[in-house]
Image (cartoon, grey):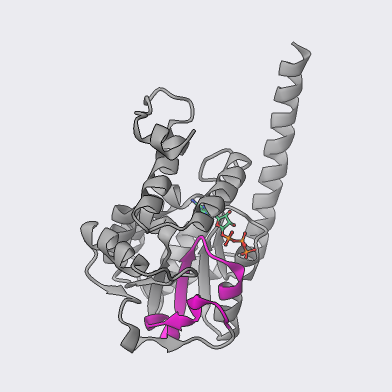
Amino acid sequence: MTLDENENHEIPKTHPRYESLKYRHKIIEGLKKLVVTEAGLIAHGRGECFDYIIGEKTTQPAKKAIRAAVAALLIAEKPVISVNGNIAALIPEELTALAKILKVPLEINLFYRKEGRIEAIKNVLQKAGATDIRGINEEKMVELQGLESNRRKVDLIAKADLVMVPLEDGDRTEALKKLKKKVIAIDLNPISRTALWADITVVDNVVRTIPKMIEIAKELKKLNRIQLNKIIDNFNNKNNIQNMLDLIIEYIEKQKSEAFNILKG
Ligand code: ATP
């Protein structure tokens, strides 16, 4: 299917892959507006593949990690949510709503800094209602140590104690960890370097995670610091990733027997 063909296609809501196609189109629209890069399309495809093998739903381990992530964002002193092109194209309204409810700034941080791209992402976020958008003023930027890519140029992230990185590259997570920052990752691949380096890893699709985080934030905002700390202390990222991998194995085993039944005819 070419992009032009896509433009003329209304996806019927009854289509079995409606949700997946809807977000594919958002990514393609993002590409046309300079928000997403060609490499972002490939990253999205890699994500879809992992989403397939977790059953395209928010699993129990992901829900546990989401709770811990929201608690950590609520008690952090200088938290920041890092924004890349894909998340801005997929769910700008929800991302903005989450930032507002948690009172956490959004910082645009890109691997590919094509001319006009930061502006395009800023416009998408502003249209979604964001007011506190960082990473747009070159004069305020400093360089993060231990990172060669464009992502080294940061604003609030430099002094942050906690950074949430939805769908990211491993190099940056590693650099953030070396600078002793806490990292929350949302990544569909449980064995990516990002997922393994992070302190709290949510193995889920950002399109489901962010709305879920908004729901949990409304609930956890009523708790005090001791209660929030307890949620974080009871969370074990290593065990949680192991549970996630076990679930994937179980899911594939189940799919295998179902596929064999179909093949038998
Ligand atoms: P790493 O360097 O951490 O090992 P990578 O090189 O695979 O990871 P990229 O290709 O830069 O990372 O980023 C894409 C990552 O984002 C992949 O791990 C992919 O699974 C994940 N991803 C893509 N789309 C989504 C999504 N909608 N929600 C959550 N994660 C996603």
Question: Is 112 positioned to the left or the right of 254 in the image?
Answer: left
Q: Is residue 77 visible?
A: no
Instruction: Locate residue 86: give its quadrant.
Output: bottom left
Picture coordinates of residue 263, whole percent (x, y): 75, 17
Picture coordinates of residue 2, whole percent (x, y): 47, 36
Q: Nearer the viewer, residue 251 or 49?
A: 49
Question: Is 127 positioned to the left or the right of 213 in the image?
Answer: left
* Residue at the image point whose x is 28% and y is 58% from the top: 124
Instruction: Locate residue 180: give its quadrant.
Output: bottom right
**Would you say residue 165 sits in the magenta stretch?**
yes
Instruction: Locate residue 148: give its quadrant.
Output: bottom right
Q: Vertically, is 161 above or below 128?
A: below
* Residue at the image point whose x is 66% and y is 64% from the top: 238
Q: Nearer the viewer, residue 264 or 136?
A: 136
| Image: magenta residue range | 147-172
Q: Vertically, is 79 above or below 214?
A: below
Q: Which quadrant does ligand 1 occupy?
A: bottom right
Picture coordinates of residue 177, whole percent (x, y): 58, 79
Residue ranking furthest to the top: 265
Picture coordinates of residue 115, whole percent (x, y): 37, 70
* Residue at the image point whose x is 56% and y is 62% from the top: 201
Question: Is 184 positioned to the left or the right of 135 in the image?
Answer: right
* Residue at the image point whose x is 70% and y is 31% from the top: 254
Question: Is 158 positioned to the left or the right of 53 in the image?
Answer: left
Q: Vertically, is 21 above or below 91?
A: above
Q: Vertically, is 136 above or below 27?
A: below
Q: Nearer the viewer, residue 126 or 227?
A: 126
Q: Is residue 42 visible?
A: yes
**Would you say residue 81 sits in the magenta stretch?**
no
Which image quarter is the C terminus in?
top right
